[in-house]
Image: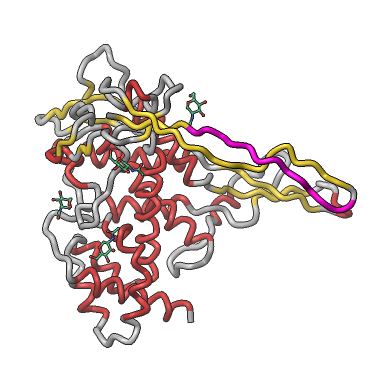
Amino acid sequence: MATAASQSWVLGILILLSVLQVVHASWWYLGVASSYQFLAYEVRQSDKILDDACASLQFLQPQQREICNHDVKLLEVISSGAAMGIEECQHQFRDRRWNCTTYNNTSVFGPVLHIKSRETAYIYAISSAGIMYSVTRACAKGELDKCGCDNKVRRLQEERGFQWGGCSDNIRYGARFSKDFVDSVETKQKDHGSMNLWNNGAGRKTIKDQIDIQCKCHGVSGDCSVRICWRKMRNFREIGAALKAKFDGASLVRFDKRRGRLKRVSGKQKRPTRKDLVYLADSPDFCEYNLKYGSLGTRGRQCNKTSYGLDGCTLMCCGRGYQTLVSEEVEDCDCKFYWCCKVVCKKCTNVMEKHYCN
Ligand SMILES: *[C@@H]1O[C@H](CO)[C@@H](O)[C@H](O)[C@H]1NC(C)=O
Ligand SMILES: *[C@@H]1O[C@H](CO)[C@@H](O)[C@H](O)[C@H]1NC(C)=O
Ligand SMILES: *[C@@H]1O[C@H](CO)[C@@H](O)[C@H](O)[C@H]1NC(C)=O
Ligand SMILES: *[C@@H]1O[C@H](CO)[C@@H](O)[C@H](O)[C@H]1NC(C)=O
């Protein structure tokens, strides 16, 4: 039943997407498209054959498109992973000049990707992590045929004080899948390909490092004589935040053409590990409107007058100053309870100040 329903919505999306064929395009678009699920209902009666619909997903690489033919449920899981990456990027960067703007077309993140900057690094890392996360979670829920819980954990040595049991998240399967799906688009021999592969990997390693052990007590009359534990991924929000910290500490690297790999720019720098984010070019300041590198500028953005951080008016507005809008909000206050049974409140007027960049 569930499969039939999910097939029909994916089919709907496919037909919708087949209308929009663009050359420079990416699987990220699956994440944007998933917000149009409602359209699936309208085309439920469609008699278009699935194979044709899959073939029309021109923004996917041929090997990615194969999945669509064989496992429509998996394509749905990938779509949700792509959407998770996009949403998390926008959440983590909501207070920054560049706030992870996306476009309603197959380029998704738009021209910011023209610069091989920290922003590009974050986009790749969070997207790769999103796919790994979504697939791993679907495995644990039993939604996919090819994977389930991680039963190898149980064969680990007995730990002191607990036994492995329950359903451990199969992050190894999720990581392998994400690598196959996401990395397949990149070429290692190119500078940007090398950078993207590195950051894809760093996204996946961040999930691996954030894995928790959760436990449940068993025993007679509620004592904890037996503790059963399993591995569980943290919330995706925490993964996004950990990658945001790595964005701030990202390493500038250069591409060594002869050796075909990335190297530190100077020997004084800390050598980046595979868990770090790396970038090849400095970011623009994103102060002014410039579509060449996807900057919308910060005019009209709300800023925080009392913050010295990047969300503060000085930095957010790039020294151009800001305007203050004052509004009044009426609220209940000083409420008193009278026996019986009445609550009487006064009306208070709060003056709200909001600041916007010039
Ligand atoms: C994106 O494009 C689709 C199809 O062209 C349209 O239905 C949808 O409303 C658009 N969404 C936004 C947020 O502009
Ligand atoms: C997507 O839309 C943005 C903004 O409208 C535009 O700058 C960009 O060229 C478009 N990209 C593609 C691939 O259509
Ligand atoms: C992101 O920034 C642009 C312009 O700088 C602004 O129009 C948009 O509302 C911002 N988005 C969010 C979610 O704050
Ligand atoms: C503004 O920044 C200050 C200091 O960082 C913080 O305490 C406050 O919550 C922020 N206000 C808003 C509306 O974000």
Residue plotted at (82% across, 47% down): 225
Quarter of the figure with residue 207: top left
In this rendering, does residue 193 appear at all? no
**Rendering coords of residue 93 (x, y %):** 37, 37
In this rendering, does residue 133 appear at all? yes
Q: Please give the range of residues in magenta.
A: 340-352
Residue 150 to residue 333: above or below: below
Quarter of the figure with residue 177: bottom left
Residue plotted at (58% across, 42% down): 330
**Rendering coords of residue 109 (x, y %):** 24, 47
Residue plotted at (18% across, 36% down): 289
**Rendering coords of residue 123 (x, y %):** 30, 42
Quarter holding the C terminus is top left
Is residue 347 in the magenta section?
yes
Colour mode?
A: secondary structure
Is residue 295 in the magenta section?
no
Residue 27 to residue 320: above or below: below
Which SS type dominates the magenta stretch?
A: strand
